[in-house]
Image (spheres, helix red, strand yellow):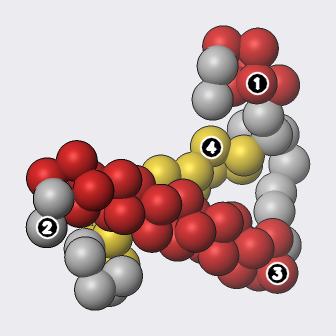
Amino acid sequence: LNYVEDVAATVDFNVVMNDQLGIIEVQGTAEEGSFSRTQMNQILDLAQQGIEKLFAAQRLALSV
């Protein structure tokens, strides 16, 4: 996120996965109020999609 997006976010979430998409670390904080279990699952789904794209870009860059 850029600064404007980060300041406006109501949830701060970090997700780390390995190359088999196993979860290594999840850290999440509601900046104001709370978030639901459904929202957390949606966040994890979006994180996985982004991580898959990062792994694909890394493989392409390394020609693996």
Residue, disc 4: 12
- Mark 1 lies on residue: 5
Q: Secondary structure at mark 4?
A: strand
Position of residue 56 in the picture relative to residue 32 (left or right): left
Q: Nearer the observer, disc 2 or disc 1?
A: 2
Percent across and percent down for residue 16 are 35, 62
Give the distance between the C-alpha atoms of the residues marked 3 and 2, in whole angstroms: 36 Å
Three-letter amino acid code of the residue under disc 1: Glu
Question: Residue 19: where, in percent of width, then height?
Answer: 25, 76
Residue at 62%, 43% in the rendered image: 12
Q: Nearer the viewer, mark 4 or mark 1?
A: 1
Of marks 3 and 2, which one's residue comes earlier in the chain? Answer: 3
Q: Inspect the image, locate mark 2, and give the three-letter code of the amino acid beneath it.
A: Val
Q: Is residue 59 above or below residue 44?
A: above
Cα distance in 3D space between marks 2 and 4: 33 Å
Question: Which image quarter: residue 5?
Answer: top right
Residue at the disc numbered 3: 38
